[in-house]
Image (cartoon, rainbow, N blue to C red):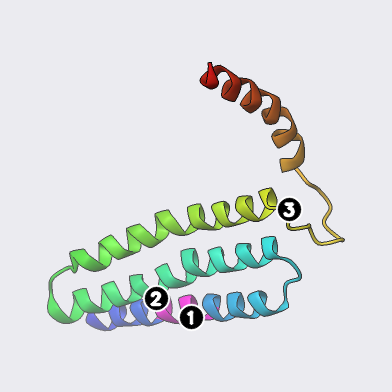
Amino acid sequence: MKNAGELLAAVLVLVGAVICGISAFGLVRLPDVYLRSHAATKSATLGVVGVLAGAFILDWISSGTASFKLLLVIGFVFITSPVAGHLNGRAAYRSGVPLWENSVRDELKPVLAQAEPEQTAAAERDQR
């Protein structure tokens, strides 16, 4: 059982490291901030969580007790990384960073155009 657990931990760490490597390649090669943010988010969510899960399993096997701290870190990274990536992309869009010229769709533009009059009306109500 110990060998199978060590093998599982090694596979998780290796897969996580490969995902982080692919993501690093994407950060260098992708053309705009939106695609780069996507690559960085995938790395943190899948790659880092894979490495941490492997470390958790290996620690559990070697010490016989589960590390609550590692579980907290895994949960924290898994929850916060996608949110941070989304907010980076949204902030870049709202500050006017252009999309890559070969981008096919801009799904946020009509949503923001529809929300702008509503936000203006709400701001005017708040000023009264």
Q: Which is more toward the observer, 101 or 6? A: 101
Q: Which residue is mark 1?
A: 17
Mark 2 crowd level (few <14, some 14–19, many ≥20, 10 Å Cα): many
Q: Is residue 14 magenta?
A: yes
Residue 11, x across and y down, in percent: 42, 79
Which element type, helix, strand or loop, lies under badge 2?
helix
Residue sitting at x 52%, y 21%: 126
Residue 33, x across and y down, in percent: 68, 64
> What is the magenta segment's predominant secondary structure?
helix
Q: Is residue 72 above or below residue 65?
A: above
Whether residue 78 can be seen here: yes
Give yes or no for contact between labels 2 and 3 (Cβ–Cβ under 8 Å): no
Q: Is residue 48 above or below residue 10?
A: above
Q: Which residue is mark 2?
A: 51
- Image quadrant in which the N terminus is located: bottom left
Q: Which residue is mark 3?
A: 96
Whether residue 1 can be seen here: no
Mark 1 crowd level (few <14, some 14–19, many ≥20, 10 Å Cα): some
Residue type at mark 3 is Gly
Residue type at mark 2 is Val
Which element type, helix, strand or loop, lies under badge 3?
loop
Of badges 2 and 3, the one in the foreground is 3
Give yes or no for contact between labels 3 and 1 (Cβ–Cβ under 8 Å): no
Give yes or no for contact between labels 1 and 2 (Cβ–Cβ under 8 Å): yes
Q: CA distance from mark 2 to mark 3?
A: 36 Å
Residue sitting at x 58%, y 25%: 123
Residue sitting at x 62%, y 62%: 38
* Part of the protein shown in magenta: 11-18
